[in-house]
Every structure is written in structure tokens, then in C-alpha cells.
Image (cartoon, helix red, strand yellow):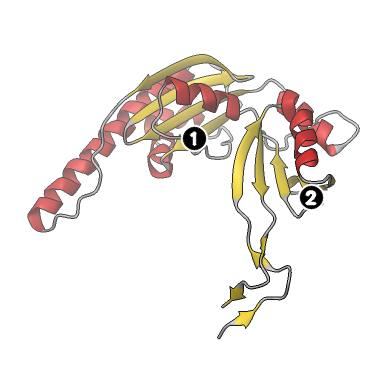
Amino acid sequence: MSARSTPGAGRPGSVRTAFVSGERLAGWAERFGASHGGFRISDDDDGVRLLADDGTTALLQAPWPPDGRPGRGADPLERLASVAAQPRTAGLVLVRRGGYAAAVAREGILLASKTGTRYVQSRTAAGGQSQQRFARRRANQADELVEKVAAHAAAVFGGQPLEYVAPGGDRTLAGLVLDHSAMRLYAAVPRLDFLDVPDPNATVLSKAAADVCAVRIQVADAPATNPNFRAT
């Protein structure tokens, strides 16, 4: 059964994610307010929310989990920027079927890194014995990739005072790398939010090193108003 929505109702707006360094956060917030008619601030357990006058919202989250090192400032935005600017060291493990990267980053700067390529075939629609042989070959390739990345990551991380580990790329592969026996020394290191990255290379790694210590911002556009929109 369909019901005509009331005037002003509409479909949900799109959501997009951005990463902004602590030193640029005040300028980003100023531009956000100018674009959306101003905003008010709500500080809750999820992060700092900017609630714009036109219905757009932005959820701002610190790169680090709460650990007794609060930021300084007169308001939540200043304190969030201060937290993001704190120098902390993170190990990155980025892996997809087409490549991998392991690195140690601090304040967006790569202190040590290793990148490489390793091909893992995509799935096939073939059936029967051919499909079984293909699946075994694909599984073997994935196992070899995990083994290789885990060894490189352990070598890159060695001797570095890691405070966090940041996985990225393919969730399954990255999880297998972090759970590999070669990474047992880092099993208890806190993990940061997952980074959605393409096939890792030097350029992707450099951006990830900057993003890992930046404020994560999720902007949700105001719902599209359409008095003729029908909700089912």
C-alpha cells in the first residue's frame, strides 16, 4: 500500500566521508557553516555533530579512541582538533587482491614502509571440476598473499613503538594478515577504524598515512524535499 508523503518530506540525502587534519578543522567547519546557513554543535558519545540550518549534518570523529589524553580548547571543535593534532604512532596494513602496503606513520609522515603487488584471481562463474580447481588456486593465491604481507608488516613494524594498528583495503584479507602468527606481537595493539582504500601503492599509502591521523567526517545531506514523493 502506498501513502503520499506530506509536503516537505522526501528521500534521505546522500552520505559522504572526508578526512580533515586537526589544523584545518576550524576552516572546514567555517566553510561548512557558510554553505549550509550556519550550524549548532552537539557533542555526544559518537563524536561532535554539526547540525546545519538546512538539515545537513556532519559527524566528526577523532582519529584516536579515548585514552585519557583529551584535547584542549574552549569548545568541542577546538578540543577535537587538538586531539587529532596529538602526535601518535600507527602501523598500517593495507591489502587487496591487487597489492599491499605496510607502514608506520606519525603525524601523517611515513617512518617506514613497504609496498608491493600480488595478484589474486577474481571469482569465476564456471561450474563443475573447473570451478573447484579455480577455487583451490584462488585460495592458494590468497594464502600466499596473506603470508607475504604478514611477514612484510612484521618487518616494517619491528622496533617501532606502535600505539595503534590501522587495517584497510579488503576486510577479510586484512583481518587474516593481522591474525597471522607473524603478527602475534601486535595482537594486543588497539585497532583504528577500517580504511576503505583501492589497490595499495605509494600514492594510496601516502594518503592513508594522512587520513589515519585526521578527523573522520561523515556528511549527510538534507533529505530531498518532494511533495509528490510516494513512500511505500
Picture coordinates of residue 144, whole percent (x, y): 26, 32
Tag 2: amino acid: Leu
Pointer 1: residues within 10 angstroms few (<14), some, or many (20+)? many
Which residue is at a point 66% across and 51% down the rendered structure image? 220
Which residue is at a point 61% across and 50% down the rendered structure image? 15
- Between 45 and 122, the one lying in front of the other is 122
Please indicate, yes or no, whether residue 28 appears anywhere in the rendered image: yes
For the C terminus, the image quarter is bottom right
- Between 180 and 199, the one lying in front of the other is 199
Picture coordinates of residue 114, whole percent (x, y): 41, 18
Residue that mark 2 sits on: 51
Pointer 2: residues within 10 angstroms few (<14), some, or many (20+)? some
What is the total number of numbered labels drawn onto the structure image?
2
- Between 44 and 201, the one lying in front of the other is 201
Left or right of 71: which side holds 135?
Answer: left
Please indicate, yes or no, whether residue 159 appears anywhere in the rendered image: no
Left or right of 133: which side holds 3?
Answer: right
Residue that mark 1 sits on: 167
The image shows residue 74, relative to residue 104, as above or below, that is: below
Picture coordinates of residue 14, whole percent (x, y): 60, 53
Q: Residue furthest right?
A: 74
Left or right of 50: which side holds 104?
Answer: left
What label does residue 75 carry, if any? none
Q: Residue furthest bottom?
A: 1
Q: Earlier in the sequence, mark 2 or mark 1?
A: 2
Q: Nearer the viewer, mark 2 or mark 1?
A: 2
Identify the secondary structure beneath mark 2: strand
2 and 1 marks in contact (CB < 8 Å): no
Identify the secondary structure beneath mark 1: strand
- Between 194 and 153, the one lying in front of the other is 194
Tag 1: amino acid: Pro
Picture coordinates of residue 192, whole percent (x, y): 58, 36
